[in-house]
Image: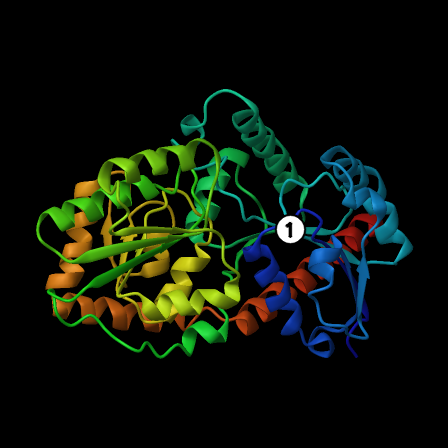
């Protein structure tokens, strides 16, 4: 007979669309009987909790401190969460943001943030609030990794780079996120077939200093100067210095907005619409842990021109044409190759589609909770052996 496990999940820092998709994906596919889980208690803010299905085994918590200022949230996590976990008789805690202050044991920590670790990225931010914030996150996450009983990384690349900073960890697991079935079921209405046709390129990501949208705009300008009939749609919005750099590049490359369209953030449910209308997907980020929009484009069967940094080559696995994301000439060359070389285009689309098939929320959920249970059992066995001596 399986043990009745009471699992706690700290999702208090989860605020982005990608984190929402992950939580919903793993919980919607959780078979509690398979893992001997009696109850799951999740702590988060109402916006996320209201999106979760109402299950008899799922208990949602949103204390007032958690919905207050960042200081209140940190205080709750450091001083209150451990007590609440004990009140609910939780056997183990799954923390979905590694910058955690909670010292409950046993605990599994999920790593999803690479900004503080990727070589060269921190230096893009001038000394000020943002750079200090990233350094604080680095310190907090390294401390959380070291005291955790298990750590989940999304890619092999992330596991390697982060352990160069925090030190070698004793118990880790690589568990990539999934991709919603809606992206795998996209049947694109048109495909790139003629270099003389209007070619629609798409890049989905918020503007930030490591996303390099301005270099993509410059690359499309170079291709238009060669005579290609090509447009670019940027989806995701942005603010701050990165958005200013992007706007300056657009003003220089396309002052009359003839070929560059900029859209704000759109809900994930609308992303398939843009993927269906695109001919080529461009992903030019210099830093990622698990690039969700890239995997969605792979699943949709789009030809992909992609950054050669971070985990992108690992994720694509020859399912795209790579480029230096800070070199507009290389970006233009990669896009041009997809336009002009049908055999290359067909090969990368086929490989990307096959590679994307391994990313499912069912697999992510099974591997996540299987690992959590193993960590809990190991902790209990180690503790029993310690007290038996």
Pinpoint residue 353: horizontal percent, then vertical percent.
33, 72
| Residue occupying the point 43% across, 43% down | 207
Q: Nearer the viewer, residue 238 or 376?
A: 238
Query: Which image quarter: residue 299?
Result: bottom left
| Residue occupying the point 60% across, 29% down | 136
Drawn side of residue 215 relative to residue 330, left or right? right
Q: Nearer the viewer, residue 126 or 81?
A: 126
Label 1 element class: loop
* Quadrant for the N terminus in the image: bottom right
Task: Determine which residue is flagged by label 1.
Answer: 14
Query: Which image quarter: residue 281?
Result: bottom left
Pinpoint residue 112: horizontal percent, then vertical percent.
54, 49
Q: Nearer the viewer, residue 11 or 32?
A: 11
Pinpoint residue 12: horizontal percent, then vertical percent.
71, 49
Drawn side of residue 123 relative to residue 214, left or right? right
Pinpoint residue 186: horizontal percent, then vertical percent.
39, 76
| Residue sitting at the far left | 226
| Residue occupying the point 41% across, 43% down | 287
| Residue sitting at the far top | 127
Query: Which image quarter: residue 130?
Result: top right
| Residue occupying the point 88% across, 58% down | 88
**Can see residue 147?**
yes
Binning the other alpha carbons within 10 Å of mark 1 as few (below 14), some (14 to 19) or many (20 upward) gives: some
Q: Nearer the viewer, residue 304 or 354?
A: 304
Callout count:
1
């Amino acid at each position: 007979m399986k043990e009745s496990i009471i699992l706690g999940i700290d999702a208090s820092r989860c605020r982005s669309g990608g984190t929402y998709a992950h939580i919903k994906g793993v919980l919607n596919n959780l078979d509690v009987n398979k893992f001997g889980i009696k109850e799951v208690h999740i702590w988060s803010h109402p916006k996320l909790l209201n999106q979760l299905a109402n299950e008899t085994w799922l208990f949602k918590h949103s204390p007032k401190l958690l919905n207050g200022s960042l200081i209140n949230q940190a205080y709750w996590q450091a001083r209150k969460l451990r007590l609440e976990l004990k009140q609910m008789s939780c056997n183990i805690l799954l923390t979905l943001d590694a910058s955690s202050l909670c010292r409950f044991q046993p605990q599994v920590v999920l790593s999803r943030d690479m900004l503080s670790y990727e070589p060269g990225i921190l230096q893009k931010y001038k000394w000020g609030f943002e750079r200090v914030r990233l350094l604080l996150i680095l310190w907090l996450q390294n401390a959380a990794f070291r005291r955790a009983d298990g750590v989940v990384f999304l890619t092999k690349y992330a596991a390697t780079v982060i352990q160069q900073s925090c030190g070698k960890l004793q118990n880790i697991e690589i568990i990539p996120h999934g991709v919603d079935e809606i992206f795998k079921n996209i049947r694109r209405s048109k495909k790139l077939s003629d270099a003389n046709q209007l070619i629609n390129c798409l890049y989905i990501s918020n503007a930030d200093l490591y996303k390099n949208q301005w270099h993509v705009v410059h690359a499309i300008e170079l291709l238009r100067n060669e005579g290609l009939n090509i447009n670019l749609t940027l989806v995701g919005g942005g603010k701050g210095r990165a958005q200013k750099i992007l706007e300056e590049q657009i003003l220089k490359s396309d002052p009359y907005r003839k070929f560059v369209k900029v859209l704000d953030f759109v809900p994930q449910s609308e992303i398939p619409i843009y993927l269906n209308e695109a001919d080529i997907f461009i992903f030019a980020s210099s830093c990622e842990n698990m690039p969700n929009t890239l995997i969605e484009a792979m699943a949709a069967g789009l030809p992909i021109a992609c950054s050669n940094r971070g985990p992108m080559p690992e994720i694509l696995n020859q399912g795209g044409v790579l480029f230096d994301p800070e070199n507009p000439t290389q970006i233009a060359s990669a896009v041009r190759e997809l336009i002009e070389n049908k055999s290359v285009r067909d090969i990368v689309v086929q490989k990307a589609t096959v590679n994307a098939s391994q990313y499912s929320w069912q697999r992510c959920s099974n591997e996540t909770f299987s690992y959590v249970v193993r960590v809990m059992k190991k902790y209990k066995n180690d503790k029993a052996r310690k007290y038996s001596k």
